Amino acid sequence: MTRVSTFGQNDFAVNSLMKVQSSLSRVQMQVSTELVSDSYKDIAGDTVILKALEGDLEKSNNMVSNAETIAARVDTMYGAVGNMVDILAQFQVTLSSAISGETAESAALNENAQAALDSFVSQANIQMSGRYLFGGSNTATPPVDVSDPPYSAQTYPSVESYDYYQGDEQEASFYTSDNDKITYGVTASQSGFEKSIRALSLAANATEAPVDQDALLEAYDLINDALDELLVVQSGLSTTASNLEREIDMELDYQLTLDAMIGDIKNVDLAAVIAEQEQLQVLLEASYNVTVSMSKMNLFEFLS
């Protein structure tokens, strides 16, 4: 009976030692990684939920990344339209002087108007990351070309012409995570662009000696209308930027919720596992001492 009992005790001690070693190895991994497990198999009961949450988080991250890219485009367009407004307002001062008959201003009118037209076109053809922003879906081609052809120099009385426009009418849009559509594109085919280009072309081609008052007056009125319309365009871009910012903030809040839910499944209570690690280390040392003591029993002690 003594031998059977001793064999059983020794086997039990060895098995206990192995179990403690395995538990300690698991806990040490948890302490170092702060994760319940480094593979899905050890959290099999929560795997389906975890994968679904991680998929939602990845989708949300992609949505935020896209929204931030589009927000940057909107911000660039907003600044460009603001520059167009400044160009028109500054030239309107020059135009007003020419209309009032101030010779110093009217003498260089054509040159000033051409410079303003060139600056306006430069803003209408602004790019971001190699994309032209005011040409609809045609992002590879400058949307505005005022060379002749395609665009004829304007003379009094002018005629509405969009021959300068090289883009299309497809306004860019963005879909939120709720599948809501946000249209953010602005095309240079809008009326405010056409009136601006026509007014500046009129002034650039008006006779200076004598000053073509009819052409300048028409240009002045066109600029007034264009300024009003471009300010509306800029206001719309501001609203779009606010909508995008709100969507991004909502999505970031959603990501915090997803992170917390994923953490509840994957992450450990670090303080608790550190305490468990300390307990297992004490238990391992005790189990090891017992096993060593039993292994030192010699054959005589075993048979006695």
Image (tube, rainbow, N blue to C red):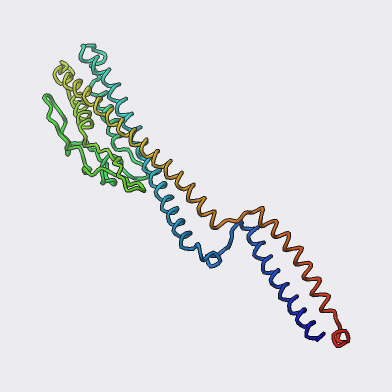
Q: Is residue 94 above or below residue 231?
A: above
Observer able to see residue 299: yes
Q: Is residue 216 above or below residue 31?
A: above
The quadrant the N terminus occupies is bottom right
**Image location of residue 56, percent across then percent down:** 42, 54
**Image location of residue 124, percent across then percent down:** 28, 35
From the viewer's perspective, tell me whether residue 164 is left or right of residue 9: left
Q: Nearer the viewer, residue 95 or 300?
A: 300
From the viewer's perspective, tell me whether residue 288 is left or right of residue 134: right
Q: Residue furthest front?
A: 1
Residue shown at the point (32%, 38%) measured from the top left: 126
From the viewer's perspective, tell me whether residue 36 is left or right of residue 101: right
Q: Nearer the viewer, residue 280 or 126?
A: 280
From the viewer's perspective, tell me whether residue 94 is left or right of residue 10: left
The quadrant the C terminus occupies is bottom right
Q: Nearer the viewer, residue 136 or 278?
A: 278
**Image location of residue 103, percent across then percent down:** 23, 12
Q: Is residue 112 above or below residue 2?
A: above
Number of numbered discs: 0
Image quarter of residue 23: bottom right
Q: Is residue 102 above or below residue 154?
A: above
Residue shown at the point (53%, 57%) measured from the top left: 265
**Image location of residue 135, percent across then percent down:** 26, 41
Residue shown at the point (77%, 78%) measured from the top left: 9
Observer able to see residue 118: no
Q: Nearer the viewer, residue 88 or 14?
A: 14
